[in-house]
Image: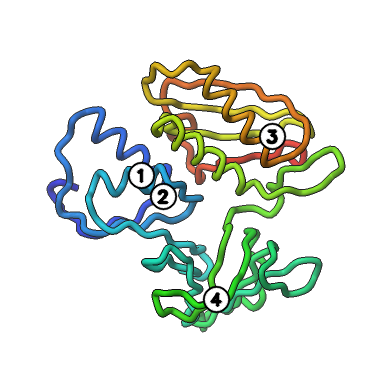
Amino acid sequence: MKEFKPVWLIIQPSIANLMYECLTSNNLPLITSISYVELTGEILDTTVRQKMKKLFDCHVANQYGANEVNSIAYECPCGNMHIMENNVYVEIIKDRRCVLNEMGEICITSLTNSAMPLIRYLIGDIGKLKRFHCECGNKAPILEHIYGRNSQWIINESNNKITPYIIVGVFNHINRVFNEVIIQYQVIQNSYTSFLIKLFLEDTDIPYNFIEYEIKRKLKEELNFTFNLEFKYYDDFFDKYGEEKHSFFFNLITQ
């Protein structure tokens, strides 16, 4: 990259995280040619976004898309994910009806694929569609709380489904409180009342029990049911060489 001098970087957040650690831990020269970073393919949390801004000192944007239709939504300067209306028509389906301002399955219709158009295709992801005036001037609908695989809900003993997107908020909170101590995390629901939390942390003097206490406190506040937590710590990125996207949450109950 130093030799090629790219100006535009499109990358998954987990790979961006690896790049940041590689460059900073090995004191490698920065790639000053990059003027724009687009993050796609996974949930983007604030920590990775801040790392990219710190590393390249440029505009960083989030993009949501799929192999079937390419770009579906793109982040404007105000931080809202506007639907790419020239490319796709997006609906949200809940209980077999179209909804607005509610969480449901993302349903897409391709508008540019004349070879094999997809009509009302349930892509397998979850999100919320909203319409409101955005200060950026873009009048396209806004897609919120996007996360992958509709089977990956948090489920309690009453079989209520809870959006796992709250996990991202919890760990963003932890990093704000403890100065970006968490490099990588993953939450696995083993049963209705037990979760495994995998953590790769920065070198820190903060006692682990402080971090664990705050994670449990914040999760309890968000989930509002009784559960047990098991913590597992790693000295490096876990699933470092996996071929799939990095998922921040897995529900083993539904497997």
| Comes first in the chain, label 2 or label 4 | 2
Residue extending farthest to the right is 158
Q: Amino acid at mark 3?
A: Lys
- Tell me if mark 1 has few (under 14), some (14-19) or many (20+) residues whose alpha carbon lies within 10 angstroms of its own: some
* CA separation in Å, label 4 and label 3: 32 Å
- Left or right: where 208 falls relative to 187: left
Q: Secondary structure at mark 2?
A: loop
User: Secondary structure under badge 4?
Assistant: loop
- Residue bearing mark 2: 12
Judging by the rendered image, the residue that carries numbered circle 1 is 16
Disc number lying in front (1 or 3) = 3
Total marks shown come to 4
- Which residue is labeled 4 in the image? 132
Q: Residues within 10 Å of mark 2 (few under 14, many from 20)?
A: some
Check the picture and name the quadrant holding the C terminus.
top right
Q: Earlier in the sequence, mark 1 or mark 4?
A: 1
How many C-alpha atoms fall within 10 Å of the one at disc 4: few (<14), some, or many (≥20)? few
Which label lies toward us, 2 or 4? 4
Q: Is residue 97 above or below residue 217?
A: below
Residue designated by label 3: 220
Density class for disc 3 (Cα within 10 Å; few <14, some 14-19, many ≥20) is: few
Does any portion of residue 26 appear in the rendered image?
yes
Q: Give the Cα separation between the discs numbered 1 and 3.
A: 30 Å
Residue placed most toward the observer, 87 or 207: 207
